[in-house]
Image: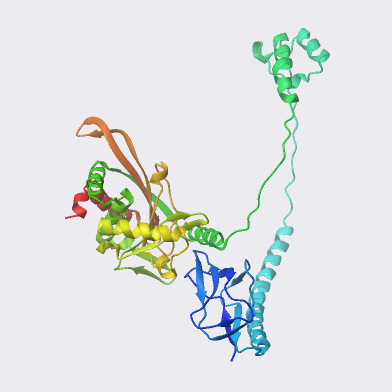
Amino acid sequence: MAELIKMPRLSDTMEEGTVASWFKKVGDKVSEGDILAEIETDKATMEFESFYDGTLLYIGVKEGESTKVDEPLAIIGEANEDYKSLLDDAKKSDEVIQEKIEIKEEDKEIEVVKEELEIENVPEPISKTTSSTKRIFISPLARKLAKERGINISEIKGTGENGRIIKSDVENYTSSSKDAKSKTFVGIEDFQEIPHSQMRKTIAKRLSESKFNAPHYYLTVEYDMSNAIIIREQYNSIPDIKISYNDIIIKACSLALASNPKLNSQWFDDKIRYNNHIHIGVAVGVDEGLIVPVLKFVDQMSIVDINSKVKDLADRARNKKLTPEEMQGSTFTISNLGMFDIESFTSIINQPNSVILSVGSIVQKPIVKNGNIEVGNTMKVTLACDHRVVDGLTGSKFLQTLREFIENPITMII
């Protein structure tokens, strides 16, 4: 019996997928577990395997083409088996769903037309135009010289008394301003248009929704990084260990979240979820955009464990080898641009999470310590909060707790 294979949902945010390549062609034998195709989702390109034995009878989406989740992708059955009725049933099902959508859209259109008709009945305001002429003060000699040289005196800036145009103004205009205006610069207008990738479209959609739906506000603080610099140097003096400042920050955030659980939360339409587990998403830049792999149960990890896990996830993110499970389930997100010398920035919340922490670079500058000015190393962080879930006091307390761990990192080790 022929089996219809639909475009799978390979991530929690996936709405459509693009077939990057087919590993089988129509007529090929297929066994359960064989890789049928590579599918590009909003987050990564993943291999899609067959769950059936048989012959590949039909391919519904060509390489490079996209289709929505649950749309027909392929059909597997016995050789020469008639699969048209199966395909027709799938198309009829889609048509019924589309018809319902069109009816809803038609209702909306009627309402819009009604509003437009009402607007058309509003009388247009009467526009008023005013005109004014400005008197130009110019000496007779300057006027004569301008006329001889064909210069519009309204374009000359006067340097005489009360802005009066004098002879030198006309001469200077002819030797500089006029020459500059007479130059014509010619070039070829050139550009490239690149179609949106599935990942870029989803990033745009989700971030727009987050910025529009979640009332963001921002809290920025500056931390003294002197002790963090020392502790990192001590770690990195140990053979085969190289930790980053980001590893220290991730560990500090996990401990601060444990002390401030209201930030470890998520907003849904009918409820707020307060998570007892701590899963931190770490933003990783890739060629196509941004991926947020997730460190799960990070509060149980050491700084060295975090370093190893982040490196592994980041490498596989850049090579499109992350699994859907490794990109889902974050309860808190960190975005760090400090390595690019960005001192401070704000991020858009990775919904349904309630907050995201933006980390800047470490800056060496004069600071006041015990009443004395000395050279210090500081770092700014900005916490973006969803005001529906986290109020200003709650966010501020979290940043205070985070300060205690970052400025005294030995407390994270003991």
Above or below: residue 373 compared with residue 332: above
Q: Residue at x 49, y 72 (%)?
A: 10
Asked if one can make out residue 132 in the rendered structure from this viewpoint, the answer is yes
Furthest-left residue in view? Answer: 414
Q: Residue at x 58, y 60 (%)?
A: 197
Q: Nearer the viewer, residue 211 or 179?
A: 179
Query: Residue 170: horizontal and vertical position, in percent?
Result: 73, 13
Q: Nearer the viewer, residue 269 or 332?
A: 332
Task: Give the image quarter of residue 300.
Answer: bottom left
Query: Residue 292: horizontal and vertical position, in percent?
Result: 42, 60
Colouring mode (rainbow / by chain / secondary structure / one colour): rainbow
Asked if one can make out residue 396 in the rendered structure from this viewpoint, the answer is no
Furthest-top residue in view? Answer: 141
Furthest-bottom residue in view? Answer: 1
Does 309 sit left or right of 97 as displayed? left
Query: Residue 350: horizontal and vertical position, in percent?
Result: 43, 60
Q: Nearer the viewer, residue 241 or 168?
A: 241
Does 108 sit left or right of 13 as displayed? right
- Location of the C terminus (image quadrant): bottom left
Q: Residue at x 74, y 26 (%)?
A: 183
- Location of the N terminus (image quadrant): bottom right
Query: Residue 394: horizontal and vertical position, in percent?
Result: 31, 56
Q: Residue at x 19, y 34 (%)?
A: 370
Task: Give the image quarter of residue 326.
Answer: bottom left
Does 409 sit left or right of 152 as displayed? left
Q: Nearer the viewer, residue 262 or 300?
A: 300
